[in-house]
Image: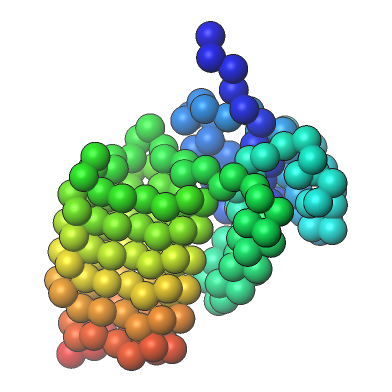
Amino acid sequence: MKHKEDLILIGGGGHCRSCIDVIEMDGRFTIRGIVDEKQSKDLMVTDYPLLGREEDLCELAKSCQNFLITIGQIKSPEPRIRLFDHLKQLGMVLPIIISPLAHVSRRAMLAEGTIVMHYALVNAGASVGRNCIINTRALIEHDAVIEDHCHIATAAIVNGAAKVHRCSFVGSNAVLRELVTVGERSIVGAGVTVLRSLDAYSHLSSPVL
């Protein structure tokens, strides 16, 4: 039986609990524990120990090389970006995690630190960057591009050849029409249909016509 490598998770909230379920089903890693700033109710129901705070990462990195950022991303990508950069400076490995219940085309590309949650689909020719969340039932269609540090939320649809620039958030049940572009650090609200391209730093809560 192949030896499983240890994996440490950073962030102990609700998104972490969802990630744990995916990691356990994936079966490639043994979760060693969780790094969080405090003991929370979410953390207490995970069955995994609190290993320390962010300030302890340097010490933890001496005995474990694999880390996954399990902090959610809605209002701001900054906590995930900061942690990702810190882990890279420490020389850590940020694995790609794919739920066995998801489908990622062998002709798609995923980058380090990204997680694809249950029942998501990443189609042929699509590209997903580093440190992204492709959440439950999200659809990334053929030739779409999701750049680094993006969160494509539950049941969101990114249609063919659309592009989501870095550090953006696409909310639950949002739909991006084919070929549109969402500018850097934009927020597309839940249920919004994007029919034309958006500039950087856009914050959209109603349909674009």
Q: How is the image coloured?
A: rainbow
Quarter that holds the C terminus: bottom left
Asked whether residue 24 is in view, the answer is yes
Residue 103: quarter of image: top left
Please tell me which residue lies in front, 13 or 66.
Answer: 66
Compared with 191, 111 (above or below) is: above
Residue 26 position within the rendered picture, expressed as x and y whole percent measured from the top left: 47, 30
Compared with 191, 140 (above or below) is: above
In the drawing, does residue 147 fall left or right of residue 175? right
In the drawing, does residue 13 fall left or right of residue 187? right
Residue shown at 21% from the left, 45% from the top: 107
Residue 22 position within the rendered picture, expressed as x and y whole percent measured from the top left: 49, 38
Residue 80 position within the rendered picture, expressed as x and y whole percent measured from the top left: 60, 64
In the drawing, does residue 50 fall left or right of residue 45? right
Please tell me which residue lies in front, 92 or 138.
Answer: 92
Residue shown at 81% from the left, 51% from the top: 58
- Counting every numbered tag in the picture gives 0
Please tell me which residue lies in front, 173 or 11.
Answer: 11
Residue 125 position within the rendered picture, expressed as x and y whole percent measured from the top left: 19, 53
Residue shown at 76% from the left, 44% from the top: 61
Residue furthest top in the image: 1
Residue shown at 84% from the left, 46% from the top: 59
Asked whether residue 39 is in view, the answer is no
Please tell me which residue lies in front, 44 or 109.
Answer: 109
